[in-house]
Image (cartoon, grey):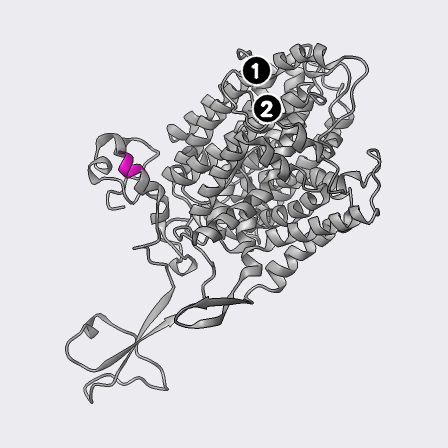
Amino acid sequence: MLRYLIQLISVTGQGTRRRGDCQQIKMNISGPDSEKPTNGELAPLTKNDEPRGDKSVVIIREREKRLIYTISDNPPPHLTFMFAIQQMLTTISSSMSMSVVVAELVCARDDDEIKTKILSTTMLMSGISTFLVSTFGVRIPIYQGPALPYIIPLLAMSSLKEFYCPNYHVSPDSLSSVNGTVGDAVSLNETRELTYSKIQAISGGLMAAGVIHLLIGFTGLVGVFARYIGPITIVPTITLVGLSIYTVAVKFSEKHWGVAAITTGTGLILALYLNGKKTPLPGYNKKRGFYIKWYPLHTVFAILFSIMAGWTLSAILTVSGSMSDDRNHIHYYARTDSRNDIIFKSPWFYIAYPGQFGMMGFSVAAFISCLVATFMSVIDSIGDYNAAARVCLVPPPPSHAVNRGIFLEGVMSFFAGTTGACHATVSYGGNIGAVGITKVASRRVFQVMAFMYIIFSVVLKISAVFITIPYPVLGGCMILSFGIFIGLILSNLQFIDLNSTRNLAIVGIAILLGLMLPYWAEKNQDVIKTGNAHIDNIFLMLISNGGFVGGFIAFFLDNTVPGTLKDRGLDISEESLDEDLYEEGYEVYEFQNMPRFIKESRIYQFLPIFSKKKNL
């Protein structure tokens, strides 16, 4: 079993033929009996042209590679490490932002010890979940982290009385700072017990929602949902969730718009304007001596170089005194030394463990909030899996691969509840955009990144260095990665009939209501009065979630308004897909090294998380 596990993790590209890489063309020059191509064309190679002593020339016409590294490719170790660092830098802001939101929700804004534990727990869960999902789950390179479907419900919970903090009230504006101001009403010692009780209540609700999450995947219910959830439902849902990131992106970028613009602009120039170009790099070996190697370095490291450019500009402005050292000034968190104290205050080592904040409790409001986020994340994951497959140039994931991914996400959601993370780990769209920019889709890169997250969750001194990245640099990266991601989600519209008034009306109305109702709920929180405080809170949280509102409206209208499956984009089958569009086939979703007797077993054939095709 250990040997099989090692073989499964070490998936190589050997034996995997890229689709459309080359086309065989045969020109026969053997004699008068051979077919002569006309008009200078080359006759295609046929089955009758098997080796039979005739003199023929087979020309292999190679097509330009659309990805630098495909899913099954394993880049050299040094490049793999750098690619993993680059992907990690694009996601560190999400871990930090979620830690801030959770800390403020549980009244721990000024408790550095609890904030450190929450950050460590978040990074540990992200690392383990990313490795499991990319290796054993859906098996495509996708990061699992504290994604947006859980930020919105947490912010909605902060308006409830049972989660109100005595000394301050949580608002989305607080996302702009890791360090808060010490409240005057209640001291840290007095709030510690209150903080633990809130974490315990959220943890119980998250564990219960996690069980439902994993059952949806394990029983194959997600496949049933997929019959009714098409592009018309996915596009408004995830677009509204993705658009909600603008509040966080603004809070990061407004610290210095110039630095954010340089960060974004550098990435755009390297990834888009110079796309297809190659960088000359000096090389040396004994046979050739010194030589020049052409490699798309600026493309594969576009995000890393953009971060370096923004960070360097922040350092220059900090040293020159162009940025104020006043903590209350808007430019303060654009300085490179604004949060250096985090490095010194963070402990060297810490290992998150189940029950670190005490025995789990239960709250109806927390359970409903986590349950809504669970259903949102399932729809989000279906869209993310398809977006990741599209950017990796592989066919859409089959139902059993989606079931596995959702199942493992649910398992990790449950364990996130046991450790007190207060949020689940689900697919993260920002990294999908990063893959599209860098053209590096290797599964191995994400496996290495997962191990980095696990290591940094234990060695907090190292992770603290990444947290010191200036805020506008993070904002610029979010503009790049989430901009590409939202574009990928909108590309799902290509599968529906855009000339249909039905489809356009449903998508437009869903997005509009997804923006209207949360805005109205924010301005009129006391309007909903059913006579039961718990029901009032449930309705308030539901209509405050734009993704839920838009997704529900789109789902209801798409399945009640008459329309053909073709118009709705629900008739896409394996046979209808053009193989020339892909670099690899459905084999990327399968366990290539699994013993045959396991594949032919009854359990394997019965469970909906495994393929029913024995020849894969």
Q: Position of residue 570 (x, y in %)?
A: 45, 45
Say whether residue 55 is magenta. no
Quadrant the N terminus occupies: top left
Q: Quadrant of residue 168?
A: top right
Under mark 1, the amino acid is Phe
Q: Find the residue positioned furthest to the left.
A: 52
Q: Looking at the picture, does residue 88 appear above or below residue 605?
A: below
Query: Residue 576, located in which quarter of the rendered image?
Result: bottom left
Q: Secondary structure at mark 2?
A: helix
Q: Residue at x 60, y 39 (%)?
A: 92
The magenta-colored residue range is: 1-5
Q: Which residue is mark 2?
A: 117
2 or 1: tag closer to the N-terminus: 2
Q: Kindly identify the residue that appears in the image at 55 percent across and 18 percent down.
A: 203
* Residue at the spot 69% in from the left edge and 10% down from the top edge: 531
The spot of residue 227 in percent (x, y) is: 43, 38
Amino acid, disc 2: Lys
Tell me whether circle 2 and circle 1 mark residues in contact (CB < 8 Å): yes
Using the rendered view, name the quadrant where residue 437 is placed: bottom right
Circle 1 Cα neighbour tier, 10 Å, few/some/many (<14 / 14–19 / ≥20)? many
x and y, in percent, of residue 482 in the image: 62, 46
Asked whether 275 or 348 is in front, the reply is: 348
Quick check: can you spot residue 241?
A: no
Local SS, label 1: loop
Is residue 320 rendered to the left or right of residue 121? Answer: right
Q: Which residue is mark 1?
A: 357
